[in-house]
Image (spheres, grey):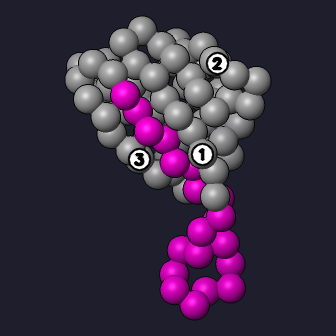
Amino acid sequence: MRETREFRGISKRLAANYLENLGGTRLDETGDRIEGDGWTAELSERRVTPVPGASITLNEVVIEFRGEAEALRTLIDRFAQKAMRAGG
């Protein structure tokens, strides 16, 4: 199974740390690839404009999750909870 999610307001470094805390291991020094039991995640980072024409930009981390359906469901739910609390 593969699922791609975007998370705004956190950095790729923080996202990689969250994935490590959820049982993952970095596969490279940059933290672009993280692997856990039954899953892998590839991270990228970009700046986005939240509203067309707005003058501000936000950091957005894009994560492509791959793995077993049950492992991904649990991982993505737990990660999303951590990411949601990151900004506040």
Residue 81 seen in this snapshot:
no
Q: Element under label 3?
A: strand
Q: Element under label 2?
A: strand
Question: Per the image, is 51 magenta?
Answer: yes
Q: Position of residue 15 (x, y in %)?
A: 61, 36
According to the image, label 2 marks what residue?
26
Residue 61 seen in this snapshot:
yes
Residue 21 falls left or right of residue 11: left
Q: Which residues are drawn in magenta?
A: 47-66
Residue drawn at (48%, 13%) of the image: 36
Residue drawn at (33%, 39%) of the image: 3
Location of residue 77 (image quadrant): top left
Contact, mark 3 vs mark 1 (Cβ under 8 Å): no
According to the image, label 1 marks what residue?
44
Residue 63 falls left or right of residue 38: right
Residue 40 falls left or right of residue 10: left
Instruction: Kindly report the distance in space between the C-alpha atoms of the residues bearing marks 3 and 1.
Output: 11 Å
Q: Residues within 10 Å of mark 1 (few under 14, many from 20)?
A: some
Q: Amino acid at mark 1?
A: Ser
Q: Mark 3 or 1, which is nearer the eye?
A: 1
Residue drawn at (57%, 90%) of the image: 53
Instruction: Kindly report the distance in space between the C-alpha atoms of the residues bearing marks 3 and 2.
Output: 19 Å
According to the image, label 3 marks what residue?
5
Q: Position of residue 59 (x, y in %)?
A: 65, 59
Q: Element under label 1?
A: strand
Work out whether mark 3 precedes mark 1 in sequence or the reverse, and give the earlier one: 3
Work out whether mark 2 precedes mark 1 in sequence or the reverse, and give the earlier one: 2
